[in-house]
Image (tube, coloured by chain):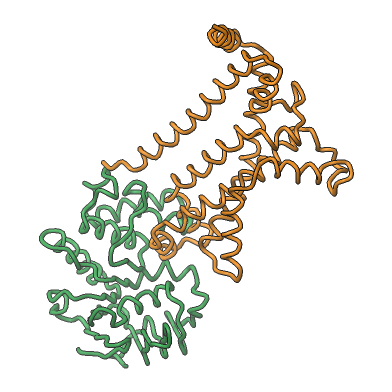
């Protein structure tokens, strides 16, 4: 499927994944344009999570080609450097059993940045996500919304260009949901590209977003 | 009254710092800790790899390791004795009746426990730990270290259990160490020897030390695990 012309950030074709002779992912073509927000809807089991995981390098898939910023990527040998540019946040994000600040800084340590740069970016991400008041709490004691915000801060610290979010507002309500929606909006305002699997009507009705729908592992564009 | 007398003499040996007694305690601790220090990193790596890699014959390897739990330590001693004895394949190293031989035996005894406990801890870890580490840019090694840190209480349980088994093991130490006073006599072999000689005081004193160490290790483990599960 083709999307409006613009700078292509990610482009792939013939994305396939089968389990027990059943195609759980069968996508002819997917192009993501830089700066766009894409919402991916579909029933449970339609392949939304599998698609996000495949693009994040967590699922072994077959594909004709996968290009990211004009670079050909072998999905079987997903390069480590791509993780710094493509963020993936689980449906229920996992926080490591260490401090919140160390959670936020994890990716920065993994990238072997300098200590001062790690400190600067960690502080910036903590303020960005508004999680400073959570710093002395245990990650396991946080609510679902708080965990989601810390996970978004952890991803944001790496300054990725593409965010893959798996149902970020599912099971959230009230303030928790509002705060997460605000962060997603902020990411979009920064000109980053987002591909969000979601059922959230409020997100689906946002202006300027591109709506993709998945059915039985196949992708179709709605708007 | 003999029991009271023996206990009093045992306490006297302990509090007066009897050189012979504390030498035996030192040999025990030194050999067991050295054995664990060498085998633990290897066994933890093996446990992690077994938990995360799939290869033909994996099931047989896992079952064999679990079966080795029940391997009598005296048979480990017998096998090692044959290997290290003068006519054995490693006889040229002259290791029989040395602390090194005892440490090798203890490594063989501890390895299955360490591997199996680590394997079970890593298999029980949330799959998102490894995935989250990877999507945040950690390599294979970084992700492995993160997973092991997340299951650190399981890995610690492996180390404490391994230590508990080797510090109190008598069969292998006796066979490949030879129970040489001042050199390879450790707590379990000394207790066995003193008891057969009718010298109960030193046996009881060493028994007390061994029990304090074993109970202390278990207490430390349950305390650490309790702290690990606490939430603010």
Give me the chain that's orange: B
Quarter where residue A90 is shown: bottom left
Name the residue located 56 percent from the left edge and 60 percent from the top edge: B49
Regarding residue A197, the answer to whether it shows in the image is yes
Where's the C terminus of chain B, which quadrant? top left
Residue A125 percent across, percent down from the top left:
30, 56
Which of A161 and A147 lies nearest the eye of the viewer? A147
Residue A175 percent across, percent down from the top left:
12, 59
In the displayed structure, would residue B115 be above or below residue B53? above
Name the residue located 29 percent from the left edge and 45 percent from the top edge: A138
Residue closest to the far front: B1
Q: Is A213 on the left or on the right of B70, as rendered?
A: left
Q: Is B231 on the left or on the right of B17, as rendered?
A: left
Which of B73 and A35 lies nearest the eye of the viewer? B73
In the displayed structure, would residue A154 be above or below residue A181? above
Where's the N terminus of chain B, which quadrant? top right
Q: Is B171 on the left or on the right of B140, as rendered?
A: right
Regarding residue B15, the answer to whether it shows in the image is no
The tint of chain A in the picture is green
In the displayed structure, would residue B101 be above or below residue B197? below
Name the residue located 18 percent from the left edge and 81 percent from the top edge: A208
Which of B172 and A104 lies nearest the eye of the viewer? B172
Which of B103 and B200 lies nearest the eye of the viewer? B200
Name the residue located 58 percent from the left edge and 10 percent from the top edge: B6
Residue B64 percent across, percent down from the top left:
61, 58
In the displayed structure, would residue A52 be above or below residue A159? below
């Amino acid at each position: 499927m083709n999307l409006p012309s613009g700078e292509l950030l990610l482009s792939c074709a013939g994305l396939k994944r089968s389990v027990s002779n059943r195609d759980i992912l069968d996508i002819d073509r997917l192009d993501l344009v830089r700066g766009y927000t894409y919402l991916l809807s579909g029933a449970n089991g339609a392949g939304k999570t599998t698609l996000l995981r495949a693009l994040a390098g967590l699922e072994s898939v077959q594909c004709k080609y996968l290009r990211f910023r004009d670079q050909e990527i072998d999905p079987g040998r997903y390069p480590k450097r791509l993780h710094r540019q493509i963020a993936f946040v689980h449906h229920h994000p996992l926080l490591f059993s260490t401090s919140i600040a160390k959670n936020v800084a994890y990716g920065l340590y993994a990238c072997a940045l300098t200590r001062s740069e790690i400190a600067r970016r960690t502080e910036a991400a903590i303020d960005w996500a508004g999680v400073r008041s959570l710093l002395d709490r245990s990650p396991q004691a946080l609510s679902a919304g708080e965990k989601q915000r810390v996970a978004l801060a952890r991803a944001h610290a790496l300054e990725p260009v593409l965010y893959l979010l798996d149902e970020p507002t599912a099971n959230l309500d009230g303030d928790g949901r509002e705060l997460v929606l605000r962060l997603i909006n902020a990411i979009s305002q920064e000109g980053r590209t987002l591909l969000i699997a979601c059922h959230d009507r409020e997100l689906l009705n946002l202006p300027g977003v591109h709506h993709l729908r998945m059915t039985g592992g196949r992708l179709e564009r709605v708007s | 009254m003999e029991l009271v007398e023996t206990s009093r003499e045992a306490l006297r040996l302990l509090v007066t710092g009897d050189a012979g007694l504390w030498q035996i305690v030192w040999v025990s601790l030194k050999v067991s800790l050295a054995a664990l220090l060498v085998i633990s990193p290897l066994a933890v790596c093996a446990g992690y790899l077994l938990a995360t890699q799939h290869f033909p014959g994996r099931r047989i390897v896992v079952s064999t390791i679990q079966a080795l739990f029940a391997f009598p330590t005296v048979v480990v001693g017998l096998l090692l004795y044959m290997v290290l004895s003068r006519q054995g394949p490693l006889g040229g190293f002259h290791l029989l009746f040395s602390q090194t031989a005892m440490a090798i035996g203890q490594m063989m005894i501890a390895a299955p426990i360490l591997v199996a406990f680590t394997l079970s801890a890593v298999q029980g870890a949330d799959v998102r730990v490894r995935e989250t580490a990877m999507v945040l840019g950690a390599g294979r090694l970084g992700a492995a270290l993160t997973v092991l840190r997340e299951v650190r209480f399981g890995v610690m349980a492996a180390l404490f259990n391994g230590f508990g088994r080797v510090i109190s093991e008598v069969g292998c130490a006796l066979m490949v160490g030879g129970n040489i006073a001042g050199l390879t006599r450790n707590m379990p072999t000394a207790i066995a020897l003193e008891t057969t000689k009718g010298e109960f005081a030193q046996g009881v004193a060493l028994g007390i030390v061994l029990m304090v160490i074993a109970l202390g290790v278990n207490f430390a483990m349950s305390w650490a695990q309790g702290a690990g599960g606490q939430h603010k």
